[in-house]
Image (spheres, grey):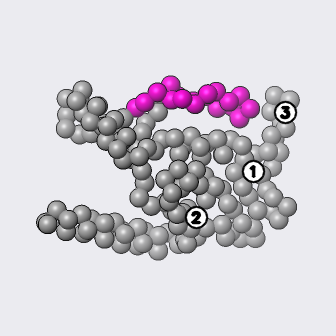
Amino acid sequence: MKVKKHGHTRIIDPKDKNGDRHCNAKGKARSSYIASLFVEPDEYNKLVHHDLDRSKTSIPPVPMVSSNLKRNNSIGFTPAKKKPQFPTPYKLYALNDARDGHRNFREVETITPIANKFHLDVDDRFGVYDEEQLAKDYFEMLSMSVGSHVERMRR
């Protein structure tokens, strides 16, 4: 879909020649920004311990760091002066591209920068109506992970 704004035509929902949907420029910038919110475990631990030293509670705060992103007028986004930092994800899920009559790659494209940054695979086995199977997979994985941590603590 094309939209005119301030004398410029912008593509809001880019489609390829097959009618399949992809991230537009704003979506690609957003996906890069989302990836910048996650850091390696060592860096995250340093940030949390630094904030815990200044905190009056034992609950780890979400570390906030200066944002190094620059304003991008072409996509109309102004980054925050500070951004939160989160630890590396263990697993990434995205809806698969199958839709009624077309394919939608936006979900996978949105988390691809995170996957590339941390060398993770994107699990896109689940579709729009597969929430139950996705939840089951997630909680089975979580249960195995907790079980292995408990077993390591026992040793």
- Decide: few, some or many residues near mark 2? Use Cα within 10 Å; few <14, some 14-19, many ≥20: many
Mark 3 lies on a secondary structure that is: strand
Side of 6 where 51 appears, left or right? left
Whole-percent x, y for residue 100 in the image: 71, 70
Q: Amino acid at mark 1?
A: Asp
On the image, numbered disc 2 is attached to which residue? 95
Q: Amino acid at mark 2?
A: Leu
Q: Is 76 one of the magenta-colored residues?
A: yes
Q: Label 1, label 3: how many angstroms apart (C-alpha)?
A: 15 Å
- Decide: few, some or many residues near mark 1? Use Cα within 10 Å; few <14, some 14-19, many ≥20: some
Q: Is 54 one of the magenta-colored residues?
A: no
Magenta extent:
64-81
> Can you say whether 133 is above or below 29 in the image?
below
On the image, numbered disc 3 is attached to which residue? 8
Judge by depth and name the residue closer to the eye, 149 or 129.
149
Q: Which mark is residue 13?
A: 1
